[in-house]
Amino acid sequence: MNVHSDNQTFIETARRAQLVDCAIQAIAEWGYARASMAKIAARAGVSTGVISYHFGSKEELIEQVVATVVTVGKEAIEPHVRAAGGARAGLRALIITNLDFIRTHPAYMRAMVEIIARGGPVDGSGPYAGHGDAAIEDVQKVLHWGQQTGEFRHLDTRVVAVALRAAIDAIATRLSAEPDLDLVRYGEQLADMFDFATRKGQ
Amino acid sequence: MNVHSDNQTFIETARRAQLVDCAIQAIAEWGYARASMAKIAARAGVSTGVISYHFGSKEELIEQVVATVVTVGKEAIEPHVRAAGGARAGLRALIITNLDFIRTHPAYMRAMVEIIARGGPVDGSGPYAGHGDAAIEDVQKVLHWGQQTGEFRHLDTRVVAVALRAAIDAIATRLSAEPDLDLVRYGEQLADMFDFATRKGQ
Amino acid sequence: MNVHSDNQTFIETARRAQLVDCAIQAIAEWGYARASMAKIAARAGVSTGVISYHFGSKEELIEQVVATVVTVGKEAIEPHVRAAGGARAGLRALIITNLDFIRTHPAYMRAMVEIIARGGPVDGSGPYAGHGDAAIEDVQKVLHWGQQTGEFRHLDTRVVAVALRAAIDAIATRLSAEPDLDLVRYGEQLADMFDFATRKGQ
Amino acid sequence: MNVHSDNQTFIETARRAQLVDCAIQAIAEWGYARASMAKIAARAGVSTGVISYHFGSKEELIEQVVATVVTVGKEAIEPHVRAAGGARAGLRALIITNLDFIRTHPAYMRAMVEIIARGGPVDGSGPYAGHGDAAIEDVQKVLHWGQQTGEFRHLDTRVVAVALRAAIDAIATRLSAEPDLDLVRYGEQLADMFDFATRKGQ
DNA sequence: TATGAATGAGAGTTCATTCAT
DNA sequence: AATGAATGAACTCTCATTCAT
């Protein structure tokens, strides 16, 4: 059976998941540049060829890493935002749960930052292409929500969304520099700040 | 005369400046990891050895890039912040002039973000560590200023500084994705947002 | 399977042996400094990366070369020395079999002399330090033996051992200059000479 | 005036001598491989081009180094051998003064060993070509002398000369490993040894 | 004569990828 | 499906040499 067909065997799916996980750990530990295929394979206890066999190229593997992190992240965050009683609470939930995700999945975030930082051609291609926009749009939706309900002041949702997304993502990097950072308190402060920045003045 | 002495020839100074500039452009265009010595040298129209001759190693070249960008950036921004009549105006000036710098020096900022984002080995060491912190502290100073004058509300200056720094830096990346972005308007919006976020409520 | 584990495949063992052999020949032919990885690989008919793959670094390859030459050499020489009826006969055997080894393995000796003569950094460290000393000590043991049995005169075993070792090693170089050298006769003369130099006067 | 003509100016001669001396020191200190033209030039306080200007190539510089060391060595040793009352005393003088030269000119010897060890193509070319033979022949002459006077036993002068030359040269290397070596005592022992090896038995 | 900027080849090493088994 | 040996290009860096000034 063609490996890249959608019709995957169980073992195939498991291998891919395992390799993606090892890639995340390897990138988080050594940084993108030093996380070679050989090291990722070694961490999975398999030979180098296996990755090529299952993913075709390193680029595809990285794309899967990104997709996985994004998916897992969304599943951890979105429900809390949706469950919020309003946009203001939703924005706070988005920030708090996002930081909570960073706190509980440091390797995921670290890997993500490494991959994004690596960049590649600036033309907007690269493994993270699209996901960045999507992440910004998720924030933007909450801001729209709040504008419609009148909870938020008049503001450029794009600008605020970009700023908030950046502020959250920056924490993964800060965490590398200050491992003892109190992310819970940090989240509260950040939520307060964006609350002030967005709410309708009294 | 030893190349690395302070007493440099005119031609030596010119070459170093040219190479630093080419490095900035190369990093901005291809990203840090893919900006090889060969590509930088080719962009300058010289052979690879020239970089080693003038800088000793790639690391030293990058250090010079960082030093140059930091210096040029500070000179463009700090005076405006200092000239502001108060902290609130200072914060706005910091944001506006920062975006203006990004608008007029897109490659500089893109390169800087690339270099700082990388930050070297995962452990946070590396030759560029500290520049990110310094940039954050510059923001933090303005926030302290405003707290002392009573212009700003009670807030965690660290958190806000990190968020603002990230929000500004993110624009360099956004600009790559959306070259037609109206940075002037963007800057006004961002300034408004952080004004709301920091000012003392009425 | 990790390449550097002890549990090696047949093909792995064969390649390593082949590469060590090619390294010996290359060093013997061009001298240590000019025996580059590229030349060694070319001699083996493989690409440069193969050496890194099997040995990790040039240094490790050279270590294997030294280990191989030392082992093969010892196995060819030591038994004859041990089998000798006494120290005087042992010393003669050491010289004769050593020259015989040079005659039958000219590249081995030439390579060994190259490697030991270099010895790494000037300070005497480096990965090959010690092998020269070990070779001298092997000679010294025979001299001690003869002093204990009373076969040899009172002498400084260190001085004589260094001299004999040097005299033997020099032949590998001489052989390069005079390929037609009669090593058998040479060995007899050398043995005679050191016999005179060491035996107890009548 | 052509630089390479025999008719050299005083300043030209002085420069060459200075450069040769710096080359000796550089090679002795860093080893042949790491004694680059740049380092040698830096040690002389001149620019790289100067060496090429005066010597044409590194090879020629090294040849001059060898020639210088050989000449200085000969001048230090030969008179003492000639002044000896007979071949036996001459041989002893050759050994003693040779070791004395090593003791008083460690950089010279260290450089010499480095150059010889480096070897180059084994075909007998290289900067030391010829000098090695000449050095052996110098020893051989003394041995012939002693055979003619009947002071020495019947022996193969070539073999003994090679052995003695090697034994002496080996000391420079030993000296690197054991800097505290007592060369005076060493010389006496070596002289004794070769006296036993060569003299007519009673 | 001397400088120092520049060249271009070659060094060891890493790595994504391929492929016979 | 998986192995692991091999490739070949790319990397940074060093160095002897050249040459305009």
Image (tube, coloured by chain):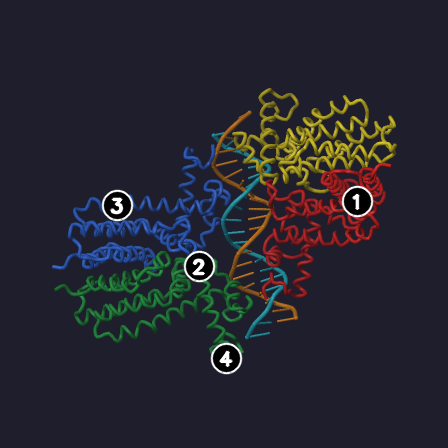
Chain colours: A green, B blue, C red, D yellow, E orange, F cyan
Q: Residues within 10 Å of mark 1 (few under 14, many from 20)?
A: many
Residue A126 vs residue D178, the one in the foreground = D178
The residue that appears at 59% across and 53% down in the rendered structure is C57
Residue that carries the numbered disc 2 in the rendered image: A31
The residue identified by callout 4 is A9
Q: Nearer the viewer, residue D64 or D30?
A: D30
For image coordinates 60% across by 59% down, the residue present is C53
Q: Which residue carries the number 3 mark?
A: B78
The Cα atoms of the two marked residues, 1 and 3, are separated by: 86 Å
How many other residues sit within 10 Å of disc 2, few (<14), some (14-19) or many (≥20)?
many
- Direction from residue B189 to residue D36 in the image, left or right: right
Q: CA distance from mark 4 to mark 3?
A: 60 Å
Q: What chain letter is assigned to the residue under label 3?
A: B
Q: Secondary structure at mark 1?
A: helix
**Of marks 2 and 4, which one's residue comes earlier in the chain?**
4
Is B40 in front, or is D142?
A: D142
